[in-house]
Image (tube, rainbow, N blue to C red):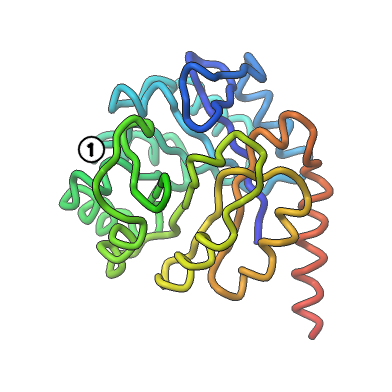
């Protein structure tokens, strides 16, 4: 299981929202590329980048910052936020982004998502953001009328790299990962799952580790890293220790 630092972009800056609320924003840095290098130097093996402005606009709004991040580090980057057509998919992959995350489009434009998966197998990640099990879209401002399991099942036959599952009510709150909901999703799909939302500290990482056998391959961490509640180097060390333990058995 890998620990994936989140870099959320708004107007070119690194920010975090509380429960996806754009009125509850905290700025943590003015230089996204420097932030990417910081997390890489702390041991990050992958970065999770979200264009928050793009998620509202339905098209990229922080492409310059994304390009700077990709150019600054030699670790893979996944990007989401406002990716609603093949042109945008091609654009990001052409920048050197390793995976594109499709969220709103996954609910509203199945044909596009399937075509993207066919053209770029294992380079598409399904972003499932939920409140109480119900899908939320358009930067979490609207409910989509489907459940987490409905959406996972819809694309079960596609060459999707992973599902990022975010519990919106916990996101940015440091109240703990929704372990049970993450486990249930992993059990009900063969697609690898990445947990997101609510990581409060090292204890959450340790509680997620047993879910690796269920198909949970990573966890995205945002606010807890920026506030210092979780030390990335220590978190990576814990996951590596668990990996080595299982290899030695």
Whole-percent x and y of residue 96? 47, 39
Quadrant of residue 210 within the rendered picture: bottom right
Whole-percent x and y of residue 232? 77, 43
User: 215 left or right of 30?
Assistant: left
Identify the residue shown where x is 58% and y is 22%: 15
Figure label count: 1
Quarter of the image with the N terminus in it = bottom right
Identify the residue shown where x is 68% and y is 23%: 34
Residue pointed to by mark 1: 85
Whole-percent x and y of residue 107? 24, 47
Vertical comparison of 103 with 239: above or below: above
User: 6 left or right of 79?
Assistant: right
Element under label 1?
loop
Quarter of the image with the C terminus in it = bottom right
Identify the residue shown where x is 25% and y is 62%: 154
Give the farthest residue toward the left.
111
Which sits in the foreground, 28 or 244?
28
User: 69 left or right of 154?
Assistant: right
**Mark 1, other Cα within 10 Å: few <14 / some 14–19 / many ≥20:** some
Whole-percent x and y of residue 125? 40, 52
Give the farthest residue toward the bottom.
249
């Amino acid at each position: 299981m890998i620990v994936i630092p989140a870099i959320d972009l708004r107007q070119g800056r690194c920010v975090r929202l509380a429960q996806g609320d754009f009125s509850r924003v905290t700025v943590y840095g003015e230089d996204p590329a420097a932030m990417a290098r910081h997390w890489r130097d702390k041991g990050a093996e992958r970065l999770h980048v979200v264009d928050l402005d793009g998620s509202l606009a339905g098209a990229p709004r922080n492409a310059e910052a994304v390009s700077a991040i990709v150019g600054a580090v030699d670790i893979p980057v996944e990007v989401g936020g406002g990716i609603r057509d093949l042109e945008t998919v091609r654009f990001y992959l052409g920048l050197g982004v390793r995976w594109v995350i499709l969220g709103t489009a996954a609910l509203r434009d199945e044909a596009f998502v399937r075509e993207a998966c066919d053209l770029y197998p294992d380079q598409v990640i399904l972003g499932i953001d939920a409140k109480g099990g119900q899908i939320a879209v358009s930067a979490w401002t609207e409910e989509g009328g489907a459940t987490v399991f409905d959406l996972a099942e819809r694309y079960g036959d596609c060459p999707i790299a992973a599902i990022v599952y975010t519990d919106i009510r916990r996101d940015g709150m440091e109240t703990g990962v929704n372990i049970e909901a993450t486990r249930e999703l992993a059990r009900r799909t063969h697609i690898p799952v990445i947990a997101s939302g609510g990581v409060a500290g090292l204890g959450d990482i340790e509680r997620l580790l047993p879910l690796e056998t269920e198909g949970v391959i990573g966890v995205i961490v945002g606010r807890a890293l920026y506030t210092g509640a979780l030390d990335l180097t220590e978190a990576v060390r814990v996951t590596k220790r668990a990996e080595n333990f299982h290899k030695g058995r």
